[in-house]
Every structure is written in C-alpha cells, then in structure tokens.
Image (cartoon, rainbow, N blue to C red):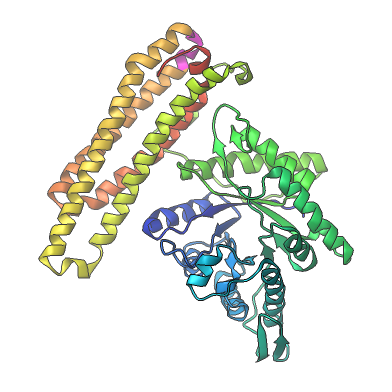
Amino acid sequence: MDDLWFGAFLTPEAAARERLMRHVTLAEQLGLDLVGIQDHPYQPAFLDTWTLLSAVAERTERIRLVPDVINLPLRPPAVLARAAASLDILSGGRVELGLGAGAFWDGVASMGGPRLAPGEAVDALAEAITVLRELWTPGDPVTFRGTHYRLEGAQPGPFPPHRIGIWVGALKHRMLELTGYMADGWLPSSAYSPPEAVARQAKVIDAAAARIGRDPAEIRKVYNISGSFSPLPGDGFLDGPPSLWAEQLTELVLTVGMSGFVLAPGLDAERDLRVFAEEVAPAVRRAVAAERGTTVPGGPERPAVRVTDLDEGGRPHAPKHDPAELSPAQRQAGQHLVDVHDGYRQELRQVRDAVDQVAAGALDGSALRSLINQLTMRQNYWTLGTFCATFCRLVTVHHTIEDEAMFPALLQRDGELAPVIKKLEQEHEVIAELLTRLDEACVDLIRDPAHLDRVRAQVDRLSETLSSHFAYEEEELVEPIGRLDIQI
C-alpha cells in the first residue's frame, strides 16, 4: 500500500477521561489519520472501548476509529458485527476493526469468557472473521455452524458504508498465517514485536498470502509503537531526535512493508503527538516518496499547533556538535536535564488531572445535596489550590537555579550559546508571569470555588508553554551540558 497512515494509541483510563478527550481532539487537529483504543473489558480502570469510540466519533469529524485490538472472547462476533457496522454508519465510514484472539486469560475467565488453548483461540478468530463478513454482506439469512460460533438464520445488516478492514493483532506463526489468508491488515506492537522480530513475522504473512494467490501488498501493516523523543540518539528503537525516528520508520516501510504507525505517547503526550504529526510523519512520507519515485499525497494544509505565549519562530539555535563524541558519563550528565524536566512533566500532568477531577465533582449535582459532600468539595478545592501553588513554587526555584548557576557556567565555557541562553531567560520571564497568574487563581479558588474555570484555563496555558520551553531547552542544551561537563 502506497498511502501511509499515522495515528495515536490512547489509553482509555476512566479517571483521566478529560485528558484522553483532549488528546483525541489534538490528534484530529494535527491531521493524524487514526486513533487506536485498546480493549480490555476485564480492566475496571478502563472505559469500555466501544462506548468510548462512540464518544470519539461524536467529538471528531475525520479521524479513523480503531479498537486496537478487540478482545474477541468477550465480544461475540455476531454482536460485534452489528456494533462495528453501526459505528461505521454513525461516523461516516471511519471504522477499522482491530481483532485479537484473546490474551490475559485469567481476566477473560473472570468476566465469564472462555479460557481457550492457543490453537482454539486461532480457530475461533478464523470463525469470527467469517461471521463478521457474512453479516456485513447483503443477502439471505446466514447459517454458520462452527466449533466456537454459530448463526442460525441470522439476518445480515446493518451494512457499513465502506469495507471495514479487519486488522489482526497476530504474534505467533499460526496467527500470522491466518492474517495472510483472511485479514485485511496486521496490527503488531513494538513492545512485543520489536523491529527485528516484526521483519520475520511480516515474511510469514506475505508467504501465506502468496500461497493462496493474494497480493501481500494488499494487507495493511500498521505498527503500534512507543519511544522517546530526545536530543541525543540512544541505542534502542525510536530513542532520539525526530530525524532518527523518521529514518527508522522509513526503513520499516521500505524493507518490511509497513503502511502505518500508531504512537502511544509518553509523559508529555501532547508534545509527543505534535512532534510525531508535524515532524516525523511528513519526513517519513517524503523519504518514502523519494525512494519510490512517487509524490507525497496532497491534502489540506494544516497550521501547526503552536503556543501563543512564546515566540517559537524567533528561537535561535546554537552550532551543533556531534553527540557521538560524548562519553557515557557526558551523555548521562546531559540526560539529567531531561530527567529533571520529566519530573515537572509528571507533576504538571497530576495538576491537570486534579483540575479535571475537581471539575467533575463540582458538576455532580447529587454530590452537592448534603452538607457533608459540600464540605468534601471544599476540601478538594483547598487541596487543588495548595497543589497548584506548590507546583508554581517548584518551577520557579528550578528556573532560578538555571538562571543563576547553569546558564552562567554554560556561557563561560561556550560563548556561542549566548543567543540561546538569552532566549531561554526571556522565556523564563514569560513562564514566571504565567506561574504568578496560576498561583493567584489557585488562591482565589480556595476562597471561592467559582474560580475553577479560571484555574483550568491557566493550567492549560502553562502546560502548553512549559512543554514547548522544556523541549527547546533540551534540544539546545543537553549536548553542551555533557560536552562542557556542566553539573546540574
């Protein structure tokens, strides 16, 4: 397949539903092609996948919706056929169906599902694919008598407006062969199938397809991936700058036949999705087009999602040195800046989640009917206010240390960093103003819960600004910190 798809693999945490929907909206705005949601019905901390995908369909207009992958033992295929077709109709033809034979059998059994042996699970999946396609095809009532699933004169329909692709999450040999024989796509994950394994597995699929006269290129191969964006290239898969990611993903397209990549974002999820959509995906598409002698498919220009409080376009860049010349100790010294920032990223994520949770409580009318619940809410507002205020003070201390110690040490040893340092100091002033506003909003919240919306707006604004600032600082200073032996 010549067209390349890029997407976001999002965790359906019930307690972080507001964050989840923010990421869905961002993925749509960034022009990503699909959103994948894992399906673990036995996991009580997760939202139900089909219910969530319906909400995602309502929130979005363009992006494809993929259960990644459906836990078949807990989703009877006849009912699944109706559900997938219904969502495809309601979403305007945006559903693709990731299908898994089952895993975590203790969890499946705890929900009343069958505990299948590996061979049985593969046979059940083959039967399920037949059931799905029969019920999506107009015609007479369907009778099907399999070992695991049966239809006794079931009426086909409703009918999806486009051919829903069945993408199998296959790992071992029989499942891989089944994918080549019957499926429209393959959904491996780098956590279980690293690049060296995925190349071998793809050959099994292609050989199986060829044996029955199928063109292996017709099978869409979509890779669930995770990694770390960092200024210094690491030793592992997808560990380094966007250019390294683009090189490694391009290699998988050209040598393995991958036609899609779905990113599970990390701690700074919004930044990861932006970099993936705005830097990695276009670079892969250009490189693949150049190698194949084709043109990059056209589409509407999408403005980059940018932070308004920082002049990102005016950021200077210092001359680059080869990071390969750094010793392990120097690399570790530079990485320490990223580790410090990751601590603040984690704290800020907790602040945003706390705001969402308090807001959810404030909107629960029944929770406000008794004096006890009102007192509980007041305690929540107080906790949130002090949490935000503490975070503000911690970031202020961090920036003070940089301004008074780290920046002067860097300038003393490398004068070419001066424009970058000056810009970072200016950004510290912008962030300091945002921190002051958030601190004031938190103090007001403790006094009056009506100020919650103001806190939410300030937290969102600060989060976007800090994410951008941390990324710029890491890009420019991680290598010099190591090379110049600067202690943080």
How many marks do you count on the picture? 0
| x 52%, y 26%: residue | 475
The verdict on residue 371 being magenta is: no
Q: Quadrant of residue 427?
A: top left
Q: Is residue 187 visible?
A: yes
Please tell me whether the stretch drawn in magenta is mainly helix, strand or loop: helix
Q: Position of residue 94 (x, y in %)?
A: 60, 66
| Residue at the far top in the pictured view | 412
For the N terminus, the quadrant is bottom right
Position of 267 relative to 49 (above/below): above
Q: Where is residue 77 in the image (x, y as percent from the top left)?
A: 62, 77
For the C terminus, the quadrant is top left
| x 73%, y 53%: residue | 3
Q: In which quarter of the image is residue 267?
A: top left
The part of the chain drawn in magenta is 414-419
Position of 427 relative to 202 (above/below): above
Position of 457 relative to 97 (above/below): above
Q: Which of 199 and 307 is in front in this view?
A: 199
Name the side, left or right, on which 79 lies relative to 333: right
| x 44%, y 62%: residue | 46
| x 46%, y 63%: residue | 43
Q: Quadrant of residue 36?
A: bottom right
| Residue at the far left in the pictured view | 371
Q: Can residue 295 be seen in this view?
A: no
Q: Position of residue 377 (x, y in %)?
A: 18, 57
The verdict on residue 418 being magenta is: yes
Q: Where is residue 103 in the image (x, y as percent from the top left)?
A: 59, 63
